[in-house]
């Protein structure tokens, strides 16, 4: 069964460093998303991406964050200068489309980011 | 602003003891309500999508129902392997496709 994959599974970085989290969405999906979950808190939306551009972003997704689809399979989230409060689990998700019955979002296993 | 509240926060059941998990929501026009299961340290695993009040969906020991203000996830005769956190999320109508999640309900089923 097709699934969303994410690398790395764990990332430890120093405050102020740049990190890139990678995702391979399900192959026939067109919509891609990033969410994060701070330990013990709810899953929060960061950004959605369609047709090579951002379609929506949350207040969390400030200028320190960027997303890119560098090729036909990968979808990346870059944090330019990490802060302690960026420590969280980051989930990538994808969906076939935005029409009814196609919009179910399937999540990857996550990348646990720890900023020291 | 879309909001999702789940209750109780945690639920402990004996194996075979049926119960229901509640998800209350406010959204500016519901497009879909989603239930996910999340195991510790893992990503949310899709269970159900519900679109309109009165709709029900079933999968093994789980049944999800929807009204205009809340959804229930009924668990019949649970087993220890049903232990997990169950997440409810809503998606509003329109071009806005993000999911707004509740905090989840942590279910523990004792053998």
Image: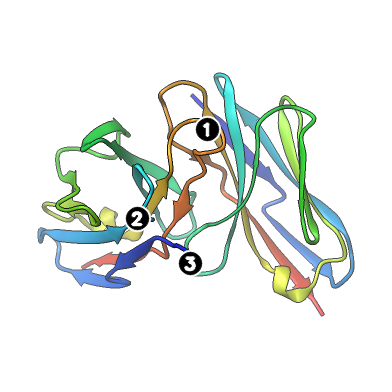
Image location (x, y in percent) of residue B44: 52, 57
* Badge 2 vs badge 3, beta-carbon distance below 8 Å: no
Crowd class of label 2 (few under 14; some 14 to 19; many from 20; radius 10 Å): many
The subunit carrying tag 1 is B
At 34% across and 45% down in the image, what residue appears? A32
Q: Secondary structure at mark 3?
A: loop
Q: Give the quadrant of residue B3.
A: top right
Residue A100, numbered label: none
Image location (x, y in percent) of residue B79: 79, 72
Q: CA distance from mark 1 to mark 2?
A: 20 Å
Residue A45 against residue B12 in the figure, above or below = above
At 38% across and 50% down in the image, what residue appears? A28
Which residue is disc 3 drawn over? B42
Q: Secondary structure at mark 1?
A: strand
For the residue pair B18 and A7, the one nearer the viewer reads as: A7
Which residue is disc 1 drawn over? B91
Image location (x, y in percent) of residue A34: 34, 48
* Badge 1 vs badge 3, beta-carbon distance below 8 Å: no
Q: Secondary structure at mark 2?
A: loop
Which residue is disc 2 drawn over? A25
Quarter that holds the C terminus of chain B:
bottom right
The subunit carrying tag 2 is A
Circles 2 and 3 on the same chain: no
Looking at the rendered image, the disc whose residue lies closer to the viewer, 1 or 2, is 2
Q: CA distance from mark 2 to mark 3?
A: 16 Å
Q: Give the quadrant of residue B29.
A: top right
Residue B89 against residue A71 in the figure, above or below = above
Circles 1 and 2 on the same chain: no
Residue A54 against residue B36 in the figure, above or below = above
* Colour logic: rainbow
Q: Give the quadrant of residue A97.
A: top left
């Amino acid at each position: 069964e097709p699934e969303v994959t994410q690398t790395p599974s764990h990332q430890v970085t120093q405050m102020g460093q740049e990190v890139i989290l990678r995702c391979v969405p399900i192959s026939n999906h067109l919509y891609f998303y990033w969410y994060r979950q701070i330990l013990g808190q709810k899953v929060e939306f960061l950004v959605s991406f369609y047709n090579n551009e951002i379609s929506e972003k949350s207040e969390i997704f400030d200028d320190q964050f960027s997303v890119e689809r560098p090729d036909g399979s990968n979808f990346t989230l870059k944090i330019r200068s990490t802060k302690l409060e960026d420590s969280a689990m980051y989930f990538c998700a994808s969906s076939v489309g935005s029409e009814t019955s196609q919009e179910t979002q399937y999540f990857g296993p996550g990348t646990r980011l720890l900023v020291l | 602003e879309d909001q999702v509240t789940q209750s109780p926060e945690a639920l402990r059941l004996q194996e075979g003891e049926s119960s229901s998990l509640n998800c209350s929501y406010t959204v500016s026009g519901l497009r879909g309500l989603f239930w996910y299961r999340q195991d510790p340290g893992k990503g949310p695993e899709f269970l159900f999508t519900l679109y309109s009040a009165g709709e029900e969906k079933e999968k093994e020991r789980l049944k999800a129902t929807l009204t205009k203000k809340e959804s229930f996830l009924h668990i019949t005769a649970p087993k220890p392997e049903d232990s997990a956190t169950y997440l409810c999320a809503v998606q509003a109508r329109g071009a806005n496709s993000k999911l707004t999640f509740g905090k989840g309900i942590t279910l523990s089923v004792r053998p």
